[in-house]
Each structure stands twice: as structure tokens, then as C-alpha cells.
Amino acid sequence: MIRTANIISAKADQKRSGTGEHLHFEFGERSYYDDRHKYHRERCVDPKFKMTPEMSSLIQNWIPFDPAKSPSGALVLQEGKTQVAVTWGSRAHRHFRVFSRMPAVAYDLEDNPIYKALKKKRSQVVGSENRVLRCIFLFDAGCGLRPSMRLLFCGFFRNLELITHPVSSR
């Protein structure tokens, strides 16, 4: 998402320098069932996103020539797998101007970021000497992967299961 936002910001900067620092991006989401009836949710962003001439024209027309004016309303860009609403706001760091309403939820005990991170760390911890305290600190830095209790009966996994499964599965 940040890559796509940077490409769009660079295009905006071509019209008026510094414009890209004011753009905020909200990416859409889609959900569907595959042919095996497995539920999927994904953010609407193509990892190979490329600016099309149509998008470039929309961005150039959306940004006013007068630096004292800011664009009104949101500019919705949709191309292929990418769907993003671009709005004007106060200056923001490029990592804090990208947003998606899709919460991070683990639907699988092994296909999730916590499992993958703990799996990488396991080899380091297992290789340590006996009688040495082994410890891994796991922080949620705002990704919200931990589901609330009311969602537990909808196919999500409990926090403890997400953390203990990678360690116990050898």
C-alpha cells in the first residue's frame, strides 16, 4: 500500500511540488468465497501497481494550480486490483498516511504473520544452551491482529493459540 501511495504522490508532485506530502490514502477491501468455499478477504491493492495515463490525468486535474487551494472531495482511483480514495489533509509521514478499514484477523493457525515471525525465531531459541532462559517479546504495534472475544465463534483463533501453535508444532 505504501508503494502505491508513493507512486501516486510522485505523480501529484509533478504538477505542484510538495503536494504528495498532503495526500492521504484509504484502500478498499474485497471479500469472496473461492471454489472450495473458503472465505477470503483482501485489501484492494496490486503489489505490481503501475500508473496508467487515465489515472495520471485524473490526479493532474484534481490538484488545483493555486497553492493556496486544496482539492475538494476525495479522488477515487480504481484500476485492476487497486481501489484507493485519495484525500487532502495535513502533512503526514509517508508511513502514516495510508489506511485500510480491513482489520488484521487470523483465519488460519499457520497462515498468519505471528506464526511466520515465531517460526523464524524458533531456530534461534532452540539453538541456545541448556539452562538458559529463552524469551521472545511479541508486540502488537497497532496492527490489531488480536480478535475481540465476540469474534471468536466466527472462525477466528484465540491469542494464546496463535502464539503457542508455532512453538509447539515441530
Image (cartoon, helix red, strand yellow):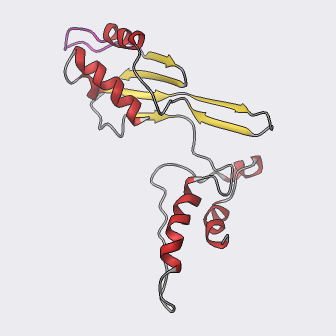
* Residue 3 left/right relative to 110: left
Relative vertical location of residue 137 with respect to residue 32 in this rendering, above or below = below
Location of the C terminus by quadrant is bottom right
Hey, which quadrant is residue 141 in on the image? bottom left
| Identity of the residue drawn at 29% across and 19% down | 12
| Identity of the residue drawn at 47% across and 50% down | 142
* Residue 78 left/right relative to 87: right
Q: Nearer the viewer, residue 73 or 61?
A: 61
* Residue 13 left/right relative to 143: left
Q: Is residue 70 magenta?
A: yes
* Residue 90 left/right relative to 123: left
Relative vertical location of residue 89 with respect to residue 38 in this rendering, above or below = above
**Magenta-colored segment: predominant secondary structure:** loop
Hey, which quadrant is residue 72 in on the image? top left
* Magenta region, residue range: 63-73
Q: Is residue 66 magenta?
A: yes
Q: Nearer the viewer, residue 94 or 118?
A: 118
**Residue 150 coordinates in the image, percent (x, y):** 71, 49
Relative vertical location of residue 18 with respect to residue 112 in this rendering, above or below = above
| Identity of the residue drawn at 24% across and 21% down | 13
**Residue 105 coordinates in the image, percent (x, y):** 62, 47
